Amino acid sequence: MSTTELGQAIALTSYAFRLFKAYWAALQERRERARLRTVLYDLSDGELRDIGISRGEIDYAASNRSIDPRR
């Protein structure tokens, strides 16, 4: 194996690793949103009101966690 081939193999492996890492992070984020959605759906309407969201806003709030629903 020449130096060029070795460099290409390393670059390809590095790319594959970064791709897998991005996929894994996206999968973990999706699972976290699903868990949050489940927890929020289990709350009563009064509890949801206390944190400033309605039942209809649960999917939005779970998907956009960086946005404060209370403004």
Image (spheres, rainbow, N blue to C red):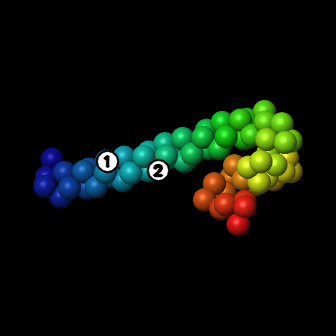
Q: CA distance from mark 2 to mark 1?
A: 14 Å
Can you give x and y, in whole percent of width and height, for residue 36 in the image? 67, 40
Residue at 28% of width from left, 55% of height from top?
A: 11
Can you give x and y, in whole percent of width and height, for residue 38 in the image? 73, 35
Residue farthest along the top direction in this orientation: 42
Instruction: Assign a secondary structure to mark 2.
Output: helix
Residue 35: assigned label: none
Can you give x and y, in whole percent of width and height, for residue 4 in the image? 18, 58
Q: Nearer the viewer, residue 60 or 52?
A: 52
Are there few (<14), some (14-19), or many (20+) residues within 10 Å of tag 2?
few
* Residue 44 to residue 15: above or below: above
In primary-sequence order, the first of circles 2 and 1 is 1
- Number of marks: 2
Can you give x and y, in whole percent of width and height, for residue 37 in the image? 72, 41
Quick check: marks 2 and 1 in contact, CB under 8 Å?
no
Q: Nearer the viewer, residue 65 or 34?
A: 65
* Residue 66 to residue 47: above or below: below
Residue 22: assigned label: 2
Residue that label 1 marks: 13
Is residue 16 at all visible to an observer of this figure?
no
- Label 2 vs label 1, nearer the camera: 2
| Quarter placement of the C terminus | bottom right
Is residue 25 rendered to the left or right of residue 53? Answer: left
Residue kind at label 2, given as amino acid type: Ala
Residue at 66% of width from left, 57% of height from top?
A: 64
Instruction: Assign a secondary structure to mark 1.
Output: helix
Residue kind at label 1, given as amino acid type: Thr
Residue at 73% of width from left, 49% of height from top?
A: 51
Residue at 65% of width from left, 44% of height from top?
A: 33
Q: Nearer the viewer, residue 29 or 56?
A: 56
Residue farthest along the bottom direction in this orientation: 71
Is residue 53 at all visible to an observer of this figure?
yes
